[in-house]
Amino acid sequence: MLPKHSRRLYRFGENRAMPSDRSFDVLVLGAGAAGLMCAAQAGQRGRRVALLEHNAQPGRKILISGGGRCNFTNLHCTADRFLSDNPHFAKSALALYQPRHFIEMVDRYGIAWHEKTLGQLFCDRSARLILDMLLSECDRGHVELVLNARNAQVERSAAGFTVTCSQGTFHADAVVVATGGLSIPKMGATGLGYDLARQFGLRIVEPRPALVPLVLGGEESRFPGLAGVSAEVAAWAAADKAKRAGGKKAAPRFREKMLVTHRGLSGPAVLQASSYWHPGQPLVVDFAPGLPASAGLLDSLLQPTARRDLGALRQALYRALPQRMADRMVEAAAPQGWSNAALEAVERRLRAWEFHPVGTEGFDKAEVTAGGVNTDDLQARTLEAREVAGLFFIGEVVDVTGHLGGFNFQWAWASAVAAARAL
Ligand SMILES: Cc1cc2nc3c(=O)[nH]c(=O)nc-3n(C[C@H](O)[C@H](O)[C@H](O)COP(=O)(O)OP(=O)(O)OC[C@H]3O[C@@H](n4cnc5c(N)ncnc54)[C@H](O)[C@@H]3O)c2cc1C
């Protein structure tokens, strides 16, 4: 049974009069996943916390997450499931607050959940239960939630931080920036976090859309004739030679579904690969990821007595792909003849097919923003700015981006708790 939070949780900016004393220990900007968690934890540690949100409601992205069921964590939460210019940065916070800690809280609130696939945990009923839980936790910490707090500006003086916004002026010794990334502007995403980072001298890794559908153009725009067709593939962003020469690892392969859309490619395999994709790079797709390299897709045609023609080629592809997609691939990859060498060349192409996306569907469609506040300018254990005491950045605004499957929320929770323990 969820405790009642809404009666006690102050929601200034809705219908309550603002008190004259607006001094707090901590001001948290952004009442999304990370901001709610950080405010609750800091409040429960006895800090006087105000949580400033420019929307009229908190946690809007939580409500739409996981198709309305919120994929709130992932059981396999290792650092290699995150992208960052510094792949080690997230380790400390992720070790401090692990999926089991969040699950304990979810269980304490009696929220039923299930593992859908690959360690992804979803609510049985509704994402609203996760938001209500976080609001209840804020209530336990006597957090003052200030909604409709627009046009926030932050200044720092010897006396501490001052935040001025449409709801008035607030003072505190510490400010936690939890305003998220640029994805889905219609949900309230803004670049405030990046602006504040720059204002206080922190560097930014250029933000870019991630977990985002890719757009095809030119000849390849004929693929979307297959819009709606999906197949299990392995997809990956082609190796960036410059980065590999610099000792960076090749982008990982994702074996999941690919969906053809009206504009290009989507589905989990492509969304995952998109986070590693940069303009100009090919997206590579293995259309038969279940087959070992030794057992070829076209083995049946390579038998000495086998029929070798387009019909036989189609039949071979039907074993791996939906019929419409197989027909399209036969058109696109028709062999230059029927010799073993020609068939082997087709096979190689189908196992590493290169698409040349002309772009992504942008921040409007991106589930997250990659890049963000440069982790070199933050302390890994606390998320505090190295050069600005009392200024913290947590959640998606930081250059730490999870794979699809609950990792982004786990980063939001973990980075929030790391900061809260230092407040
Ligand atoms: C459709 C969709 C589905 C998703 N599903 C999942 C999922 O199932 N599992 C998962 O792990 N991740 C999922 N994600 C990603 C996940 O929602 C984010 O990574 C996570 O919410 C980041 O938390 P955050 O607190 O850093 O940012 P946010 O949750 O975006 O919160 C930022 C808050 O700051 C507020 N804000 C922004 N600008 C200002 C400003 N100028 N002044 C005041 N307040 C401001 C925003 O209104 C918002 O409330 C999904 C994302 C989308 C778009």
Image: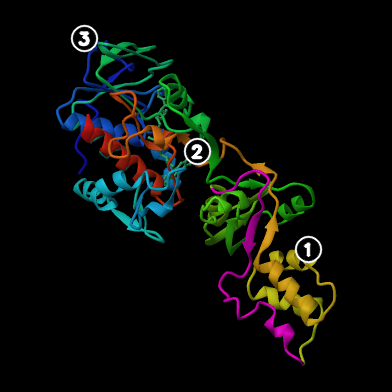
Q: 113 or 103: nearer the eye?
A: 103
Position of the C terminus by quadrant: top left
| Count of residue discs | 3
Residue in view at x 42 percent, y 16 percent: 150
Q: How is the image coloured?
A: rainbow
> What is the distance, in whole Å, between disc 2 and disc 3 at their CAs?
36 Å
Q: Secondary structure at mark 3?
A: loop
Q: Amino acid at mark 1?
A: Ala
Give, as a single range, the part of the protein colored magenta. Answer: 276-304
Q: Nearer the viewer, mark 1 or mark 2?
A: 2
**Extreme-left residue of the structure:** 46
Which residue was labeled with disc 1?
A: 332
Q: Amino acid at mark 2?
A: Thr
Quadrant of residue 385 in the image? top left
Do we see residue 127 in this rendering? no
Q: Position of residue 36 (x, y in %)?
A: 30, 33
